Amino acid sequence: MIDYEKTLAWRSGDVRHSYTAKDTILYALGLGVGRNPLDPAQLRLTYEKDLQALPTLAAVLASPGFWMKERTDLGIDYLKLVHGEQSVTVHEPLPCAGTLIGRSRVLRLVDKGEGKGALMHVEKSLHDESTDRLVAVAEQVLFLRGDGGFSKDGGRTDPPASPLPATPTSAPDLTWEWPIRPDAALLYRLSGDLNPLHVDPHVAARAGFARPILHGLATFGMACYGLVHKVCDDDPKQLASIRARLTAPVFPGETLRVDLWRTGDRDWAFRAVVLERDVQVLGNGCASLRDLAA
């Protein structure tokens, strides 16, 4: 059974990550950016001349690895762990190359009840190596399907976080469609997530899938690119934050449609749907734009 006190006290320590323009470009290519090599906006994300980084690159930099498996004393049933939500808040534009220090910690551990699982919020802050200046913060919410009930005998649990805003039911203000390359998972995994579930048909079959699924963070990154393209004038610096719930798997080769609703002067709601199966794969999405004039 999960140990609340030990798990909440977990800290990664400093994770140093040096990366180059090639890594920034590879991340964008893994999302399918660059399919039109004559598009200047796509070239700014895939060519070292005037290169810019997508904000969601922060989700894959300086990560602590699969620590839930390595720390057996915490009691986490890592085999039943599911990535439920993801957010990225960028405090300043991500450098296209450099060295960042990642510091991860468990923010919240919520017992949903015996047989109902638990929720674990993990925050990663990214800092400039030379100045320790905060660059970005990424948070993931993990659904621990096998760990519910740890507080049933008077043990501690945290209160649930505030729910994400509901997805609007009105017609979207904007839509964006993105054909996903059949080899998208093969490219995206080179940004750090080498889980064979995303490339090995035999592993996918044992997990209950007809074929390998796309990384959830790849779908999240594609939605980010859609926002940058549709509401940020193809300028990644305009996007200050993005958050969404991962609601269903995506298969490489499918078509992603992102629906967008303006909810404020610089705020947007969004969802993502796979057209071929008419399945929502990202829900409760919200994003905020930076006031560059401030």
Image (spheres, rainbow, N blue to C red):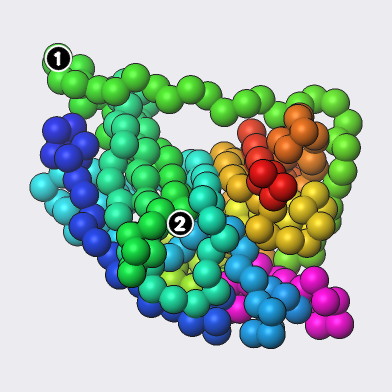
Q: Residue at x 60, y 68 (%)?
A: 53
Does the magenta portion include 27? yes
Which x, y percent locates residue 135? 45, 56
Q: CA distance from mark 2 to mark 1?
A: 39 Å
Q: Residue at x 30, y 51 (%)?
A: 104
- The quarter holding residue 37 reads bottom right
Direction from residue 82 to residue 69 in the image, left or right: left
Q: Nearer the viewer, residue 34 or 18?
A: 18
Q: Residue furthest front?
A: 294
Which x, y percent locates residue 3? 15, 35
Contact check, label 2 and label 1, Cβ < 8 Å? no
Q: Which callout, 2 or 1, points to the residue nearer the camera?
A: 2
* Residue stretch rendered in magenta on the structure: 25-42
Crowding at dot 2, Cα within 10 Å, few <14 / some 14-19 / many 20+, comes out as some
- The quarter holding residue 294 reads top right
- Could you tell me the amino acid type at mark 1? Gly
Q: Nearer the viewer, residue 276 or 84?
A: 84
Direction from residue 92 to residue 44 in the image, left or right: right
Q: Which quadrant is home to the N terminus?
A: top left
Crowding at dot 1, Cα within 10 Å, few <14 / some 14-19 / many 20+, comes out as few
- Could you tell me the amino acid type at mark 2? Val
Direction from residue 135 to residue 75 in the image, left or right: left
Does the magenta portion include 217? no
Mark 1 — residue? 154
Earlier sequence position, callout 2 versus callout 1: 2
Which x, y percent locates residue 66? 30, 59
Q: Residue furthest left?
A: 73
Q: Residue at x 49, y 77 (%)?
A: 97
Mark 2 — residue? 135
Q: Secondary structure at mark 2?
A: strand
